[in-house]
Image (cartoon, helix red, strand yellow):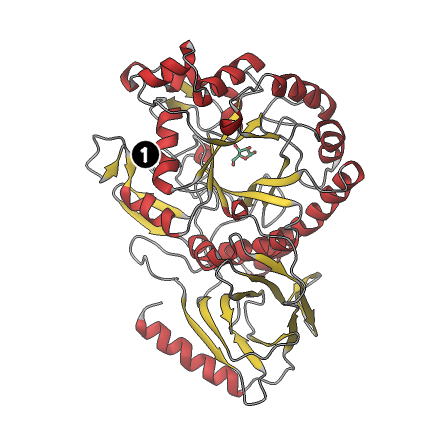
Amino acid sequence: MNPIQRGVFALCMMAAGAAFAVNPVSLTIDAAKPGAVINKDVYGQFAEHLGTGIYEGLWVGPKSKIPNTKGWRNDVVGALKDIHVPLVRWPGGCFADEYHWRDGIGPREKRPVKVNTNWGGVDESNAVGTHEFFDLVDLLGADAYVNGNLGTGSAQEMSEWIEYMTSDSKSTLANLRRKNGRDKPFKVAYFAVGNESWGCGGNMSPQYYSDLYKQTETFLRAPKQYRPKIIASGGNGDDVTWSDVLSKELKKQTYGITFHYYTLPTGNWDTKGASTGFQEKEWISTLSNTLRMDTFIQNNSAAMDKHDPEKKLGLLVDEWGTWYDVEKGTNPGFLFQQNTLRDAVVAALNFNIFHAHADRVRMTNIAQMVNVLQAMIITDKDKMLLTPTYYAFQMYVPFQGATSLPVALKDNPDYSVDSLKVPGVSASAARGTDGKLYLALVNTNPTRETEVAVNVAGQGIKSATGKLLTASAMDTHNTFQAPNAIKPVPFNATAGADGKLTMRLPAKAVVVVAVE
Ligand code: AHR
């Protein structure tokens, strides 16, 4: 919002406040009952060799006129550092199951050019390979999540990739890594065996996959201090079979089982819905569909509880986000879509769900980081803009590594359109690593503001200070002509003399505050 829009917005808020009649939603935070720690990796990102997600969006090469460090764009990397990206998953996705790591090492001009058969059939230069990826995570200060190729690869190929990356011996592969410029082993935090093995990763059954996984995992040898946490590729949507079978078969040697769920406004893959210019019925259907994540996590977690009641295995939602019809005039294989206030609300609702399941959900990766699906950043040649989703991630940074706290909402009327309804307010609270109490709130209603009376059990409150993200239209988004059409503004609320704090949330808004 520019200053004029902000002024108009404030006046509208005052006017709306004067007319405010309904009872506030009542919210109680139980700060004396800390729950599970919200793993910082819940705020992970996914970067696939897909469209302009890596090439152009992140990687321009060291000779580019666009300012870069070792080929990675300084502007994009700088913005991503500001949201404390904790880890990056690479190289896919579906791409991972056709990626052969040897294609991406050694002098770049000698690397083979392949066809990216999954994503638009374009040339894949292999300019970004293992060493370049680790440059990126080093620049970001993030952990590396490498996805292995089970579909067209082999246990041998994955085992040799692990040796290449992590061996501190004098083996031929470790020396090859040194010859290619890296003396010390790379720190591979996570390594996954395949991706979507029920679909693009090989159309396997969970039982067949679990046998292959066990065989592969046996040979993923690395020095103890460099051994990645190994991840099994699980199911998606409302199918819990993969979580059931894999948690039974793999619990001894596995960090976690993945789960994918994408939010489509219509729920129909043929006509998913537009990213902008949508009506209120697609606002609510998008929110209603995204909230299914909660049920999916509960169901998968329950399936895993049967075999892993101590919750040793994580449920890792390593692909999630909105998936719309591609923008007209763009390559359909590039999955480029606009990103609006609705996406920020979707992100915040999912964060609140992930926090509520912090005991099982130890990592999630939004799809994807730049220029693809629900992106943080959109680029056009040397320009970049930050999306509303970026700002949602920025506002939620205090939740990384925080300790979740129980939140009870009362008198929280549903927001409804026709037969669809969703809770009017979504909330999450946590004790941050800085000791402060953080509260995140979402008003899902795009036309009505709401009031939330905040109470911290056994404790008085003085104020709430933080950031608010909202805009005039449901599909407000940033463009290269208007890059600041939507961005967070300061938000403050002060308790009355009675020590009660009421927060007024504008329609269609995300608010994150420190409560003192
Ligand atoms: O994120 C795009 C694609 O969606 C990924 O490559 C695949 O794993 C999923 O189907």
Residue sticking out furthest to the top: 172
Q: Nearer the viewer, residue 297 or 187?
A: 187
Ligand 1: image quarter: top right
Q: Quadrant of the N terminus?
A: bottom left
Q: Nearer the viewer, residue 245 or 279?
A: 245
Give percent across and percent down for residue 315. Answer: 65, 40
Residue drawn where x is 45% and y is 56% of the image? 340
Residue drawn where x is 53% and y is 18% of the image? 158
**Mark 1 nearby-residue class (10 Å; few <14, some 14–19, many ≥20):** many
Give percent across and percent down for residue 129. Answer: 38, 24
Residue 66: name its quadrant.
top left
Residue drawn where x is 45% and y is 76% of the image? 492
Q: Nearer the viewer, residue 76 or 457?
A: 457
Give percent across and percent down for residue 137. Answer: 39, 37
**Residue on which disc 1 sits:** 59
| 79 relative to 442, above or below | above
| 247 relative to 353, above or below | above
